[in-house]
Amino acid sequence: MAKQILIAGFGGQGVLFSGKFLAYEGLLEDKEVSWLPSYGPEMRGGTANCSIIISDTKIGSPIVNNPDILIAMNAPSLEKYEDATNAGGVIISDNSLIEKKVAREDVEAYYIPATKLASDENLPGLANMIMIGYMIKKTGIIPYENVEAAMKKVVSAKKQNLFDLNMKAVELGYNYAE
Amino acid sequence: MSEKVLMKGNEAMAEAAIMAGCKHYFGYPITPQTEAAAYMAKRMPKLDGGVFLQAESEIAAINMVIGVASTGKRVMTSSSSPGIALKSEGLSYLAGCDLPALVINVQRGGPGLGSIQPSQSDYFHATRGAGHGDFHMIILAPASVQEMVDLTFKGFDLGDKYRMTTMILADGTMGQMMEPVSLDMGEVKEYDKSWALTGTKGERKPNIVNSLFMLPADLEKYNFERYEKYKLIEENEVMYDEYMMDDAEICIVAFGVAARVSQNAIDEARKQGIKVGMIRPITLWPFPKKVLNSAADKVKAFVSVELNMGQMIEDVELATRCKKPVLLCNRAGGVIPTTEDVMSKIIEANEIGGAN
């Protein structure tokens, strides 16, 4: 089974980093994984996105056009990818930045004020990881136990402070109750 | 086996080059291959005798490559489409001097400055017209980050074995994406470099590396000799991969990211009962002519999937001697075909091919 994940937001919101974290989570589970960033003009203003595929079998195209899981970190991203999301899929939306509700009725929609939480909890720039934590809780796509091991792969051991903040953000998202 | 790590194609390829014993990198930044140069800038100065040099232009970089190549040391440059075009003269000189070198092209849309998005529109340039004069380069087309690594390593070996340039013809997707890779490359092989310019130390006759011949008959002789070598390569070095070809009635031909997308379409079509498979050339020159020609006796149609206006399709038609129709499924300018694009061509091929 292959899970196609699309993380989309503004450049600078940590879209690519959180995608890399997810890819490592998959790798630790011995899955096939791919990670593909948008590197075009869109990352120089407007929406940046990142395609991640976690699969039991060899991955064909690394491009996610129709996500099973969409993490929308700003309004243009939800606008752009809501319709493309697969029926039965999951949309996670940062409702501190996106006023609009998900209109689709054939997807599961979840809302978390990640940007607000990040600022309230003094986790600057870590709305991305709060959303990842929440997504793990809602989808069960990867076991929560692996979070620490995956984090060690993406945050250098020399940056203990950053490591702790990222872990705290994932935890915050994971334990978020509406 | 060593632990797998997640790496970007550009960086993995650069590390593979270092593991293959390449200590000389010359380049000039251009999207979407810049990570390769950045990686080399970080790594090379830490190696004993390692050289990273950002040249003043692509033309300067390829001429530096010629200089190092003539000493028999492993050397490389990397760029993307417009930058590779600038290197064309140097590629011809490398061929004329029979020098081994590795050149990486992480293709983007063209012509002109084009776009920075993935493309395969330098297929003709790589396989037909990389520069003036009669010559070929060995062209390797990776379809995964692991192949970016494996083919880089192999590319140096092929270059040394045949004294010629190997080009990795990748695309923006291959350069930018991350996949798990094993960097367990094994031993670096040694090759005869008795032709190299290493200084005679007064002990031997000077070696000469040169591509200028005043007498046409001399130049003709070298050209014929070189093409004898090319024949050997065509016989011995063809690489390709087959996917679901055993009972296939339609054969997709695709390389690089086009092959990855095609794999999805094949899986989808198989669910609908359409018998479709794929032959994926890994060497674009030498092109896998024999296997395609044999396939033409079994399938009812071919579909060439490309990120250009239809370039490899000519090689498919030549290889199959037009025994069966060859359809084109293409997007251009930096647009990647979708699974649906390929699916609709498979369905079309299934219909026009008639019942078996």
Image (cartoon, rainbow, N blue to C red):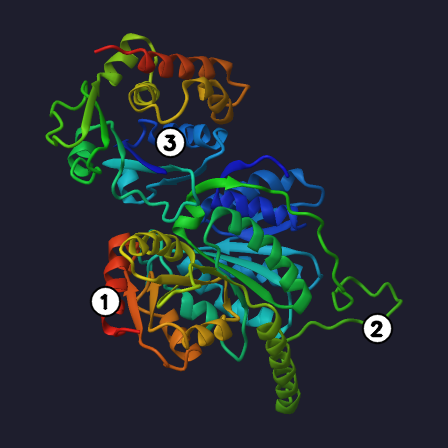
Q: Which mark is residue A86?
A: none
Categorize mark 1 by other alpha carbons within 10 Å: few (<14), some (14-19), many (20+).
Answer: some
Q: Mark 2 sits on what residue?
A: B205
Q: Residue furthest right?
A: B203
Which residue type carries mark 3?
Answer: Gly
Q: Which one is in front in this view, the residue at disc 2 or the one at disc 3?
A: 3
Q: Mark 1 sits on what residue?
A: B348
Q: Can residue B30 be seen in this snapshot?
A: no
- Compared across the picture, whether B145 is left or right of B186 comes to left
Which residue type carries mark 1?
Answer: Glu
Q: Looking at the image, tell me whether mark 2 or mark 1 is earlier in sequence order.
A: 2
Task: Pick the residue in front: A80 or A122.
Answer: A80
Q: CA distance from mark 2 to mark 1?
A: 64 Å
Q: Mark 3 sits on what residue?
A: A19
Up the image or down, A132 lies above or below B59; here it is above
Task: Pick the residue in front: A107 or A97.
Answer: A107
Q: Are marks 2 and 1 in contact (CB under 8 Å)?
A: no
The kind of secondary structure element at disc 2 is: loop
Question: Badge 1 sits on which subunit?
Answer: B
The kind of secondary structure element at disc 1 is: helix
Q: CA distance from mark 1 to mark 3?
A: 37 Å
Categorize mark 2 by other alpha carbons within 10 Å: few (<14), some (14-19), many (20+).
Answer: few
The kind of secondary structure element at disc 3 is: helix
Residue B177 image position (x, y, % from top left):
42, 43
Question: Badge 2 sits on which subunit?
Answer: B
Residue B214 image position (x, y, % from top left):
64, 86
Q: Are marks 1 and 3 on the same chain?
A: no
